[in-house]
Amino acid sequence: TAHKISVPFALMLLDAKVYPSRSRARKACRNAAIMIHRGPLTIDENTGEERFDPSKWQQALVGDRVYPGDVLARTSMDTGTYPDLNDEKPSFENDLSFQEDENDNPLETMIPGSNPGFYVVSQMKTPDIEFDVDRIKELVGDEDYDRLSLTEQNISVPVALMLLDSEEYPSRSRARKACRKANIMIHRGALKIDENTGEELFDPSKCERALVGDRVYPGDVLAKQTRMGTGKYPILNHKKPPFDLPVVYEDDYFAIVNKPAGIPVYAHKQGGHGVMTVRAGLPFAVKPPKPGIFSTMRRPQPVHRLDKPTSGLLLIAKTKPAMVNLSHQFRDRKVRKTYTAIVNGIPDEPAATSISSSEAFSMNVDVDPEDEGQWQLIDEPLDEKSAVTIWRPLQYVKSLKANQNYCTVVELKPKTGRYHQLRRHMALVAERPLVGDKTYDGGGDAMQLRERGLML
């Protein structure tokens, strides 16, 4: 807006020569090369000059916002100083490029890539005369230098990527993966110069997709292209599924939907679900990222799974970075999971398996350690793998069809994530299966409670 922009955009606005693109600006932030001071600098009472105090500054992160009057500084590793990026304070109100405009499409100013929906986000120029052989050998080793027939005049695309941007391409496997995903283009020879402006012109029509086996020569230019948000999804070959996916939260990067019971997240490998899946319904439920959003996915994708009969919140990724980040949070068990279920009967609460909230917290289970309530611990392996669940009753409800004429509402927190862990632990260990669980309720009288589906 006129009063708030991101740090990368502020860098491009204040020093376009050093930061010609958002990728260059983001890289500076990730390298801890940018500092930010909230509001104007203090004035020296004796000299009247602005006083620069690095101790009052903070490192600028990519996601930080910049406001009118803030001061940005670029760190200088050789001198230890923080020279100002700008002599004047940034004024966003007078710069139309950062005004809100519904008709503004940032893709119009970007260079289209070789594939539909892809745009060039960075360019990498090779040396004009020859490559640094010593640096190449340092990256790949003497043996691979000879095996790959690398010379000062001829190197492979993966090695060129490692040489030109070792931060993004620290290994040949990472560089080869970028080539296989069609993220790299190659321009033979130097770029042309615009006679009027003197600027270099990048013409994607004269580029070719860089393959792993292609060679790079001095003077060539490599470009990274990625899929950018266009504000719409590709044309779908199916109609909207006949169920609703309520959206609890969404932005341009991810969304949270409330999955209904009875709908699988993905179709079975052998088929059979048709369009009756969450994945098929997502393009009709969540909005596509706005034009210009970096590294978008063709269609929104679920980050994790919930069983078909289970209802609950489901995380949805709209961009590749969001998918990677959220998946890592699940892998590292940073995502906190809480389930509510209804079980058939009143489960026993043995003193031997009772633990306090502080004890559960010490087991890295997501509970409030200050809570005075007690939990029941189920530590029972499933499929020969460790499986841990804690649970506690929340409410008892009378039911003539239920065991003991009561159903119990319980809160469950799994520490591990085994197949049907909560359902199996409650049915096989606590001996109180979930209401509506056709697989583990044991049949008999419990079948009378199956009408409304699984209560999880």
Image (cartoon, rainbow, N blue to C red):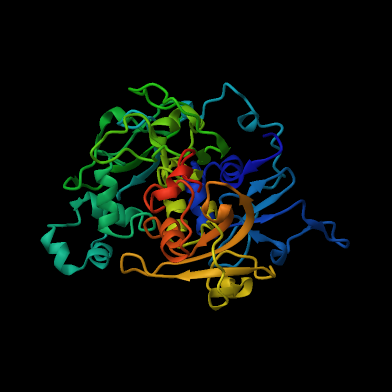
Q: Is residue 301 above or below residue 35?
A: above
Percent position (x, y) of residue 8? 56, 45
Q: Is residue 65 visible?
A: yes
Q: Is residue 357 above or below residue 294?
A: below
Q: Is residue 81 above or below residue 14?
A: below
Q: How many marks?
A: 0
Q: Is residue 174 above or below residue 349?
A: above
The residue at the point 48 percent across, 31 percent down is 288
Q: Quadrant of the N terminus?
A: top right
Compared across the picture, whether 144 is left or right of 387 comes to left
Percent position (x, y) of residue 313? 52, 45
Depth check, front residue: 444 or 257: 444
The residue at the point 18 percent across, 45 percent down is 214
Percent position (x, y) of residue 401? 53, 46
Q: Is residue 362 visible?
A: no
Depth check, front residue: 373 or 190: 373
Q: Quarter of the image holding residue 200?
A: top left
